[in-house]
């Protein structure tokens, strides 16, 4: 299961000081960088500085105004990427596309054309080397976007807004989770902990560079002891008349053999808890303890 991190997203309406969000438990911040092809948030730089000062993880987002226009989507994406580079957003983090109604962005075109434009935007961001995701409300995503196509192309990358109720919410109630495939982050309130900031919870591990996967220890196979090609049964206990009794492969005792004799070994096997050498047919196994 992914780490459940609290995440806040901030724009010009929020403070440039992230410390209150950090104290409330937020570990990641998504800062609005740009909108359309000419606007960039005047607070973004200060907010980013505070994110770093509070040792939080930083992502960025862009507010779309391209609707279903592929050409404009690419232009907005290039503007967004350019700003992200200028603000030194790490390519280990996510750049999100905020595609919803507002500031002239029209979402009620065909699902096909909407999705085509969204993919065009996300392709530009991805080709620039960034991780990319898509934000919108649950209703908009279900009614106006082919999210299956987005997820198939970009993986688990949806950031979905859906609130159980209006007003302050401190913790997400997963009974109200907007169930759909490919959700990476759920925005569950627009007033997290009474701080008048959007509250989000991760469902996917977004900070993968900090997740250390221990290297698998590959056990070296133990070298098998070499079966001798021959064995010598010496005189035992100083008695040249002493004989050694053989076993069959099932452990039943068989005939005796003389000591001070050498034998060709055909196989090795454990019988009755003893290592034995096969010196004839399957009825002729000599315990190795009597051999040299």
Image: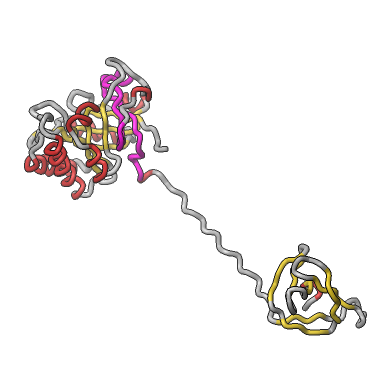
Residue shown at the point (66%, 71%) measured from the top left: 225
Image coordinates of residue 94 in percent, x first then y, are: 26, 40
Q: Which quadrant of the rendered structure holds the C terminus?
A: bottom right
Residue 122 found in image quarter? top left
Residue 146 found in image quarter? top left
Disc tally is 0
Please indicate, yes or no, whether residue 276 appears anywhere in the rendered image.
Answer: yes
Residue 188 within the magenta-colored segment of the rendering = yes
**Image: 22 above or below 214:** above
Residue 223 found in image quarter? bottom right
Q: Nearer the viewer, residue 264 or 8?
A: 264
Q: Which of 174 and 263 is in front in this view?
A: 263
**Image: 106 above or below 279:** above
Image coordinates of residue 178 in percent, x first then y, are: 30, 27
In the picture, measured across the screen, residue 253 lies left or right of residue 83, that is: right
Q: Which quadrant of the rendered structure holds the N terminus?
A: top left
- What color scheme is it? secondary structure
Residue 287 within the magenta-colored segment of the rendering = no
Q: Nearer the viewer, residue 270 or 5?
A: 270
Image coordinates of residue 13 in percent, x first then y, are: 19, 23
Residue shown at the point (10%, 32%) measured from the top left: 109
Q: Which of 159 and 147 is in front in this view?
A: 147
The residue lying furthest to the bottom in this view is 261
Segment colored magenta: 180-208
Please indicate, yes or no, whether residue 16 appears anywhere in the rendered image.
Answer: no
Image coordinates of residue 95 in percent, x first then y, are: 22, 40
Residue shown at the point (21%, 31%) measured from the top left: 141
């Amino acid at each position: 299961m992914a780490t459940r991190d609290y995440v806040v997203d901030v724009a010009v309406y929020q403070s440039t000081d992230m410390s209150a969000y950090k104290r409330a438990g937020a570990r990641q911040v998504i800062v609005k960088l740009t909108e359309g092809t000419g606007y960039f948030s005047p607070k973004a730089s200060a907010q980013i500085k505070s994110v770093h000062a509070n040792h939080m993880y930083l992502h960025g987002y862009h507010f779309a105004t391209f609707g279903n226009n592929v050409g404009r989507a690419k232009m907005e994406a290039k503007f967004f990427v350019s700003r992200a580079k200028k603000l030194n957003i790490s390519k280990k983090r996510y750049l999100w596309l905020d595609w919803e109604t507002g500031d002239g962005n029209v979402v009620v075109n065909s699902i096909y054309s909407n999705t085509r434009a969204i993919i065009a935007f996300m392709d530009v961001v991805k080709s620039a080397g960034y991780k990319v995701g898509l934000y919108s409300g649950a209703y908009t995503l279900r009614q106006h976007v082919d999210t299956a196509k987005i997820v198939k192309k970009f993986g688990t990358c949806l950031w979905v807004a859906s609130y159980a109720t209006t007003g302050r919410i401190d913790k997400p109630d997963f009974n109200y989770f907007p169930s759909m495939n490919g959700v990476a982050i759920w925005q569950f309130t627009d007033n997290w902990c009474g701080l008048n900031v959007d509250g989000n919870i991760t469902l996917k591990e977004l900070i993968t560079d900090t997740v250390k996967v221990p290297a698998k220890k590959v056990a070296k196979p133990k070298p098998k002891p070499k079966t001798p090609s021959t064995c010598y049964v010496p005189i035992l206990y100083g008695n040249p008349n002493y004989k050694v009794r053989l076993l069959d492969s099932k452990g039943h005792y068989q005939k005796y053999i003389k000591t001070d004799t050498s034998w060709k070994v055909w196989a090795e096997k454990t019988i009755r808890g003893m290592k034995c050498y096969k010196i004839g047919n399957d009825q002729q196994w000599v315990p190795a303890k009597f051999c040299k």
